[in-house]
Image (cartoon, grey):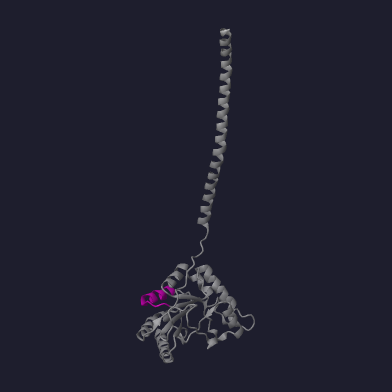
Amino acid sequence: MRKKRTQKKLRLKPAVLACLILLGLSSACLLLWGTLNTESPAKQPAKQEKIVSKKALVKKASAKKPPEKVSQPAKPRPVTDKTVFLTFDDGPSPFLSRFNHLLQQEKVPATFFFIGENLNRIQPETAKALLASGSSIGWHSMTHDAGLLYRKNNPTFLTEMEQARKTGREKLGIASNLIRAPYGSTYLSTQLHQETKDKGFTLLDWNIDSNDWRYKTSSTRVVETVLTQVNILAKQKEPLVILMHERKNTLEALPAIIHALKKNGYNFQAYKENTPFKLSFRER
């Protein structure tokens, strides 16, 4: 009887062993399948992310960067009868950097009114340098053509000022609503003057005309003309807004004008949209 049981046990052992082997192989297969299913998807997106990142970097590097936005100077000081605003029209010109260098040497700011069609002459870095030195920038139309700007039918004044503002923002990163009308705001109709204000523009004329364009190469005549008018306005106790242009004779006359004004106790400011003093021929 014991012999039969022993033989039966021996017959069972290979069967149990076979079952154990099958179970082991099944577990190994399940484990391997699970590993493949959990690891592969994780690795694949990582590769895709890497590819996307590289493409994004290439695209970013090749994209043309717009000019950084440049802020206009800080809030202005109060304006008195001893305040003077130096203003220069018709730029940017080849003399612009020399004007800025001279103003920095004298430690005085100024205001530059640029013509839109001339903006290809200036780089954003130059505009930054002007503003960093305390000066301000405004617009002087696109064409400076009186025949177009002030014609009776469809005058281009407002359209050109809007285009100059847009061009200045896109090319230089400057957001400025300050403008000067070529030849003065006298030529604006009442309706056009009101529409200009409605569009958010701040218009600045002048009360001293240097006539630098008239004297062409003479800097002495420019100095004399400016200082004669300064003496007249000093009696009227008015702030001074001096009209000049980016010309060589003006550049040569500027040191004498600045020194004379300093000697007479004037302080220099850059004109801005929120300057608490307005000067418009249309409102005088």
Residue 276 appears at what percent x and percent y? 47, 81
Q: Is residue 95 above or below residue 30?
A: below
Q: Main secondary structure of the magenta part?
A: helix
Q: Quadrant of residue 231?
A: bottom left
Name the outermost residue toward the front.
1
Residue lying at 44% horizontally and 72% vertically, measured from the top left: 131
Question: From this viewpoint, is residue 49 visible?
Answer: yes
State which region is magenta.
95-109
- Of the pair 89 and 109, the residue shown nearer to us: 109
Residue lying at 58% horizontally and 79% vertically, measured from the top left: 198
Name the outermost residue toward the right.
153
Question: In this image, 270 relative to 181: left or right?
Answer: left
Residue 100 appears at what percent x and percent y? 41, 74
- Of the pair 141 and 120, the residue shown nearer to us: 141
| Residue 103 part of the magenta-drawn span | yes
Question: In this image, 47 relative to 248: left or right?
Answer: right
- Of the pair 219 and 73, the residue shown nearer to us: 73
Question: How many numbered circles are shown?
Answer: 0
Residue lying at 46% horizontally and 70% vertically, measured from the top left: 127
Q: Is residue 91 above or below residue 4?
A: below
- Of the pair 182 and 14, the residue shown nearer to us: 14
Residue lying at 53% horizontally and 51% vertically, measured from the top left: 55
Picture quarter with the N terminus: top right
Residue 277 appears at what percent x and percent y? 48, 83
| Residue 33 part of the magenta-drawn span | no
Q: Quadrant of residue 154?
A: bottom right
Residue 236 appears at what percent x and percent y? 44, 91
